[in-house]
Amino acid sequence: MLATITSGQEAIALEEKYGAHNYHPLPVVLTKGEGVFLWDVDGKRYYDFLSAYSAVNQGHCHPRIINTLIDQAKELTLTSRAFYNDKLGLAEKFVCETFGYNKALFMNSGAEANETAIKLARKWGYTKKGIEANKAIIVAVKNNFHGRTTAIISASNDSLATKNFGPFMPGFEIVNYDDISALEKALTNKNVCGLWIEPIQGEAGVYVPQDGYLKAAEKLCKQNNVLLMMDEIQTGIARTGKMLAGDHENVRPDLLILGKALSGGVLPISLVLADDEIMLVIKPGEHGSTFGGNPLAAAVVVEAMLVVKDEKLAENAERMGVVFRHRMNALKKKTELITLVRGKGLLNAIVINDTEDSQTAWNICLKLAENGLLAKPTHGNIIRLAPPLVITEEQVHECCDIIEKIIVGFLR
């Protein structure tokens, strides 16, 4: 039986001693979650403004999702894909009809879904577009974040992700994000099979491209017979005020990559959606996952998505995002500490007037935590602010009051 933690200091010390040091968490030890709230081991309550990087859009421990998880766990959790199960087909039908595609391929983590998309794009490039063997190129963009596998970081320009992890996989070309002329040039290469982008770059600091960029990318892909690979792992499932961030421009990618909030944060689920011409290039034995498409995940994903629809979480994210950015832009006028507010729906960020290697944003987040709000910096001087989508307007204003108190008083 697992021993009981008696203090936050003990929990932190155990992780420091026995865990790999591949994360740098805020010094808060959490033990319970419900809706928009988290509690630490001392019983202190916090507003969650990270949402596990958009995995808990439906709120922590949503009772409908948890009850589905429990009910299915009592019946069957895993068979592997060596056999059929009575839940996967229902889940595949549900997600295909929800997002408008012919086929779904379930995996577990977001990185696995992106790896799947890479394989699908390359196989399609060779078997459908007629690219010469081993010559396929996927165009990626600067400051992307698609995961941390060795294949994925081969398309990264982030030295933190790449230093001392080479040699890297060939077959990627990296161009500027939000640069239509760069796409026009890159996609004319006959060996390009895919364009791999995030509709909003979350990990880069909630960088929102200019209006029309995604639509232009879609058009250029069609003109050049290139697959549009859209990574909506962080932006999808209602986070930006639409079911998908691409919906803001009515863009339908050839490969739609989803994860995180597909389960409401209760277990790893990811998937790639595509039409038959693309998905069926993968044959039995060429790709798979022991846990991908397991009956537990299949049951949970349907309920988690139904919660999003039934509770109108996309609509709430749109409304609350407007309220939040209005408050943050008003705060920006009161202090020189904030240079920029940006975002869509409830995926937002404030840029601190400081250098990336400064500790200012980190120290602000420590003060926010002391005052009952949990957020985390990205790229040093950017604070991402993304609460669960079940947040109410009253709660948004309460959280904005906390943020304003800390920001205004920070340099005094």
Image (spheres, rainbow, N blue to C red):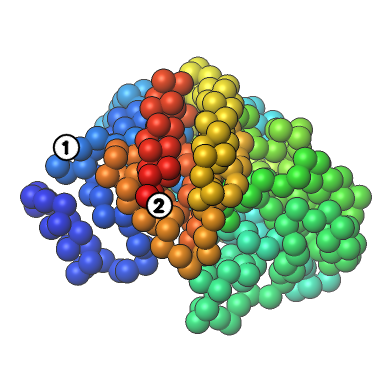
On the image, numbered disc 2 is attached to which residue?
A: 411
> Would residue 171 be found to the left or right of residue 306 on screen?
right
* Front residue (pair 300, 308): 308
Residue at x 42%, y 44% (from the top left corner): 407
Residue at x 81%, y 48% (from the top left corner): 217
Residue 106 position in % (x across, y down):
53, 45
Q: Is residue 192 visible?
A: yes
* Mark whose residue sits in front, 1 or 2: 2
The amino acid marked with disc number 2 is Leu
Residue 273 position in % (x across, y down):
64, 42
Looking at the image, which residue sits at the far front?
Answer: 412
Residue at x 79%, y 73% (from the top left corner): 135
* Front residue (pair 205, 333): 333
Mark 1–mark 2 distance (CA, rounded to whole Å): 30 Å
Task: Check disc 2: other Cα within 10 Å, few if <14, some if 14-19, many if 20+.
Answer: few
Quarter of the figure with residue 394:
top left
Residue at x 27%, y 44% (from the top left corner): 370
Residue 236 position in % (x across, y down):
58, 38
Mark 1–mark 2 contact, CB under 8 Å? no
SS category of the residue bearing label 1:
loop
The amino acid marked with disc number 1 is Gly
Quarter of the figure with residue 133:
bottom right
> Would residue 349 be found to the left or right of residue 157 on screen?
left
Quarter of the figure with residue 52:
top left
On residue 43, the disc is 1
Total numbered circles: 2
Task: Tell me if residue 323 comes above or below residue 287 in the rendering.
Answer: above
